[in-house]
Every structure is written in structure tokens, then in C-alpha cells.
Image (cartoon, rainbow, N blue to C red):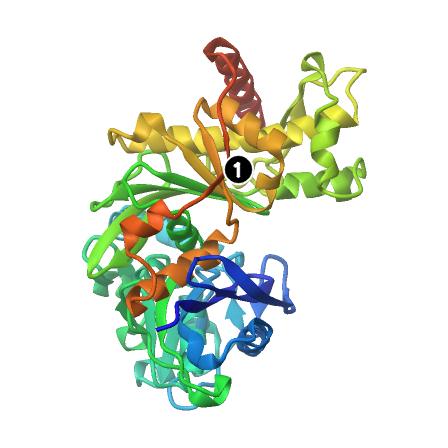
């Protein structure tokens, strides 16, 4: 059988499809943006039809560009924006409301009420998550409460719930299959990650009928077969994972202690913690990294709200650069004497601080401070924030490899050698940038190819991971500690309380 895999990467602002060949290299690619809807301040929605039609269109375009006969595609793998919530009619497939996107904050009051009632400890114990509007459960609860007739229809078994992966699979299979994978289920506030099942107590707390919930399958498993009408030939869907977990797989972070960090608008770092979930004492999230052959591997996850968007701020807010790539060259002209600390809490501070009311600040300004110093501070802020995440991970997980972390990185900011070198310096650990930066789609492709039996299993796939460049730390410990002390002082001054 051919080893070509069609990977679907359904994201927050666009849908992409990539055809990978049997050497795990990305080939034909297609991408389509779709509209974002902001009906009120803090509300973010997608039209479910846009998610579906853009996905179908990019799949067809990538397949056509590849020039391969459809019979040469062994399987489809899907990765997706996580936590985004959809509800639709079980018979007609018609959504009852727009998709409520992970960024949406409309359920803040629900979360605050549940916290005030003392439920967060139980929720965290079972799900590894915090009571935050970020996750799917309160979004689903909101739809049931606020869409006319939705609760009665749901209780009668007429409505179903899904994250984006579930919606795309439902559509690709002509409404025959209502499933998700363990990584997406783990982000809903409804799934007990230790027992690997939907949790009746959590569903009751959020008023969710369990009949709405999809069947949960392994990340590498049978998710149904596409209707022949879509691609001219039925294709099996054999791999699914949420985007950050898929990137963890694509980076071959299969051993406990391995860490990956993805740098986009924000940053998501995950450390593989092995066969048992780890309870964080530093407000990190415990989650499922992947589930293979019924065996669950867990992770700790930390999120930084501002990474690449700090560079966008230099461009759009300050106007000191005209394109993101200029930030490195400008930063390189800054002197040590002019060093500034930028705490980019533009939308609050994420892990491990979780201070939504903090706002950005910059420290160390003198009359001589200029654009180069601002550029350097923006890039260095990503390193400092990553240091705090990795430090929290090391404190939470005391595995033997934790102290010798090598950080595998991907995402747009990793193109900056200067930023990656500073990251290695401030971590005091090597930073590895892979040759294939399409790690999220690659992870979905491997999960599907593994089930299809056309790509190697975990150990052999990990051996095929190829390094583009390793950045070794070059800063002595005293200098590193002095910089970190200055950063922590700046963060303390920035916090809201």
C-alpha cells in the first residue's frame, strides 16, 4: 500500500491540507482562510459551514496539486483547533448555533459561579483543567441554556455535541460517525482523564445530557470512512489529535521528560509525563498527550498568551518595523547597557501566573532607549516566559530527565536564530529546531499512517526526526541568574495584586 497521507489541519483562522509522502515530507499544500464573527465584546464565533466547506475545499485542492491518484492516499489524519464547541441536530446535521471558539469569554460568569460554589477542586482533580471559559463544557452549557428549545431537544436525544474534529468527521462520513479522540475529549471539562471516560458528575454539574457526547477513541484508530462523493473514492480516517498534542507527536516527544514548545501568536509548551497524570502545583494543565492501543500518555501543558504577537506589536502598535523578520536585525544592534524588560501582559498573564487583570509594562527606560532596545525586549520576553513555564514543569514533574530538558521548538518565531539562541541561553538547556516545521500536520499524519500500517511505529518514527539546528546555551550561570532575577522583578511589578 502507498504511504501517502492526507493531513487536515483545521485552525482558528484558516483550514489547511497537506499531502505527506512515505518519507514523512510535506508535499502539496492548500490553505483557505474563513471569516471570524464577533457578535459582542469578548465573543468569538465561526459559522460551522465555513469550517466544513473550507476543509473540504483545501483537501480537494491539495489532492489535485499532488497529482496522485486517490487510490495512492492510504488514510486521512485530522488535527484541529481545540475547545471550540458545536451542537447540531442528530438527524439533519443542522447546527443550532454558530461554533463558539476557544477564545470566547462569554461564560466567565458561569465559571466564576462554579468557583464560588467550590467546584473547581473537583473539576481539576478529574479533568486536569481549571474552571475557565477557554474550555468546551461551559460553552456547551451556554448553548443549551440560551438557544431556544435546545435543552429540551438535547434531553430528548435529538442534539449532539462535538469539537471541530467531531464535526469534520461527521460531515466527511455523511453523518454516520459521531466520534472524537482522547486528546480532544480531555479539553472539554467533561472527561475524566484518569479513568478515560465521560464523567457523569461533571455532566450533571454543567447540565449536559450524556447522550450528546461522542464516542471517544484512540488518537490512532478507526474514525470511519469518507463518503465516496467527496474525493471520488472512500478514504479511511485513521488519526485524530488536538493541535498541540499533534505537534507533540510530530516532534516525536514520546519519552517522559521530552518537551516541545510551539511559537505562534502565543506559545504552548507540553512536557510528556508518561503513563500517569501529574497534578500541577503551579497552575499548569494536566492533559492527555495521546492514546495509542488503549494506553494513555499524559502531559503537563502551559500557555503563554503573547509570543509572536509581541513582534506584531512592534510592527502595528509602535511602527518601529514594517515586517516581523526585521525584529531580529534590529535587536542585534541593541547594547547590553540598554537592556529593557518587556512584560507583554497585553491580555493578562498566562501560565504559571494566571493573572487576567495584569497589563503590559516595560522597565529600565532611559533617555537613550530606542527602537533596537524595544525589539530586543520583545524577543527576549518570549525566552523569559518560556523559562517560567519550563521551571514550573520541572517543579511539578520530578522525572529523571526533567533537569536535562532539551526543548524541541516549532512555529513562526523559530525562524529567528537570535531568538532561539537567547532561549537556549536563558533556559540553560539546548533548543532543537527540526527540519520539518509542519509538526502539527505531521503528527496527525503519523497517527493515521501508524493505524494504516504504512509508516513505522513510534521508535522508528522518532529516529527519523531530523535536526535543522541545535542552539546550545552559551551564557554562564551567574549572568543567567541575574537576567532571570531582573525579569521576575519586572513581573512582580506588573501583576495586578
Residue 356 shown left or right of residue 251 in the figure: right
Q: Can residue 88 be seen in this view?
A: no
Most foreground residue, 98 or 379: 379
96 vs 268, nearest the viewer:
268
Residue found farthest to the top: 478
Q: Mark 1 points at which residue?
A: 349
What residue appears at the point 49 percent right and 57 percent down from the top-left corner?
A: 25
Residue at disc 1, secondary structure: loop
Query: At 50% across and 26% down in the image, what residue appears?
Result: 424
Residue in view at x 55 percent, y 21 percent: 487
Q: In which quarter of the image is the N terminus?
A: bottom left
Locate residue 217 relative to residue 349 in the image: left or right: left
Total numbered labels: 1
Q: Where is residue 111 in the image (x, y as percent from the top left)?
A: 41, 54
Comparing 207 with 177, the one in front is: 177
Looking at the image, which residue is at 24% across and 29% down?
400
Q: On the picture, is 152 further left or further right than 133?
A: left
Q: Position of residue 39 (x, y in %)?
A: 63, 67
Amino acid at each position: 500500500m502507498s504511504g501517502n497521507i492526507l493531513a487536515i489541519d483545521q485552525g482558528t483562522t484558516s483550514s489547511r491540507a497537506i499531502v505527506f509522502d512515505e518519507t514523512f515530507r510535506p508535499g502539496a499544500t492548500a490553505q483557505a482562510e474563513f471569516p471570524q464573527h464577533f457578535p459582542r465584546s469578548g465573543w468569538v464565533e465561526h459559522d460551522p459551514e465555513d469550517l466544513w466547506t473550507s476543509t473540504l475545499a483545501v483537501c480537494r485542492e491539495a489532492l489535485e496539486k499532488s497529482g496522485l491518484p486517490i487510490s495512492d492516499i492510504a488514510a486521512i489524519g485530522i488535527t484541529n483547533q481545540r475547545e471550540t464547541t458545536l451542537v447540531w441536530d442528530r438527524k439533519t446535521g443542522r447546527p443550532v448555533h454558530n461554533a463558539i471558539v476557544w477564545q470566547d469569554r462569554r461564560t466567565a460568569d458561569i465559571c466564576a459561579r462554579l468557583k464560588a460554589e467550590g467546584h473547581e477542586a473537583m473539576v481539576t482533580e478529574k479533568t486536569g483543567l481549571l474552571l475557565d471559559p477557554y474550555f468546551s463544557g461551559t460553552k456547551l452549557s451556554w448553548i443549551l441554556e440560551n438557544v431556544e428549545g435546545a435543552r429540551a431537544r438535547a434531553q430528548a436525544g435529538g442534539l449532539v455535541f462535538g469539537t471541530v474534529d467531531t464535526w469534520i468527521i461527521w460531515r466527511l462520513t455523511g453523518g454516520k460517525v459521531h466520534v472524537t479522540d482522547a486528546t480532544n475529549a480531555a479539553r472539554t471539562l467533561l472527561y475524566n482523564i484518569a479513568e478515560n471516560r465521560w464523567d457523569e458528575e461533571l455532566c450533571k454539574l454543567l447540565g449536559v445530557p450524556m447522550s450528546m457526547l461522542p464516542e471517544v477513541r484512540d488518537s490512532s484508530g478507526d474514525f470511519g470512512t469518507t463518503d465516496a462523493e467527496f474525493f471520488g473514492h472512500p478514504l479511511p480516517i485513521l488519526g485524530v489529535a488536538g493541535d498541540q498534542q499533534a505537534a507533540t507527536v510530530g516532534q516525536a516527544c514520546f519519552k517522559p521528560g521530552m518537551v516541545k514548545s510551539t511559537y505562534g501568536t502565543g506559545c504552548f509548551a507540553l512536557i510528556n509525563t508518561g503513563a500517569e497524570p501529574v497534578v500541577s502545583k503551579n497552575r499548569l494543565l494536566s492533559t492527555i498527550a495521546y492514546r495509542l492501543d488503549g494506553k494513555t500518555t499524559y502531559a503537563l501543558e502551559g500557555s503563554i498568551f503573547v509570543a509572536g504577537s509581541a513582534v506584531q506589536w512592534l510592527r502595528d502598535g509602535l511602527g518601529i518595523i514594517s515586517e516581523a523578520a526585521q525584529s531580529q536585525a534590529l535587536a542585534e544592534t541593541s547594547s547590553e547597557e540598554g537592556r529593557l524588560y518587556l512584560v507583554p501582559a497585553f491580555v493578562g498573564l498566562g501560565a504559571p501566573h494566571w493573572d487576567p487583570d495584569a497589563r503590559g509594562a516595560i522597565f529600565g527606560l532611559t533617555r537613550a532607549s530606542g527602537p533596537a532596545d524595544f525589539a530586543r525586549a520583545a524577543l527576549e520576553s518570549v525566552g523569559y516566559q518560556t523559562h517560567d513555564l519550563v521551571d514550573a514543569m520541572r517543579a511539578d514533574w520530578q522525572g529523571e530527565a526533567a533537569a536535562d530538558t532539551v526543548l524541541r521548538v516549532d512555529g513562526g518565531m523559530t525562524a529567528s536564530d537570535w531568538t532561539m539562541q537567547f532561549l537556549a541561553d536563558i533556559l540553560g538547556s539546548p533548543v532543537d529546531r527540526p527540519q520539518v516545521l509542519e509538526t502539527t500536520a505531521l503528527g496527525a499524519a503519523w497517527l493515521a499512517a501508524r493505524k494504516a500500517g504504512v509508516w513505522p511505529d513510534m521508535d522508528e518514527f522518532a529516529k527519523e526526526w531530523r535536526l535543522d539546528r541545535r542552539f546550545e546555551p552559551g551564557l554562564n550561570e551567574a549572568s543567567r541568574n541575574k537576567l532571570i532575577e531582573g525579569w521576575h522583578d519586572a513581573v512582580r511589578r506588573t501583576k495586578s495584586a
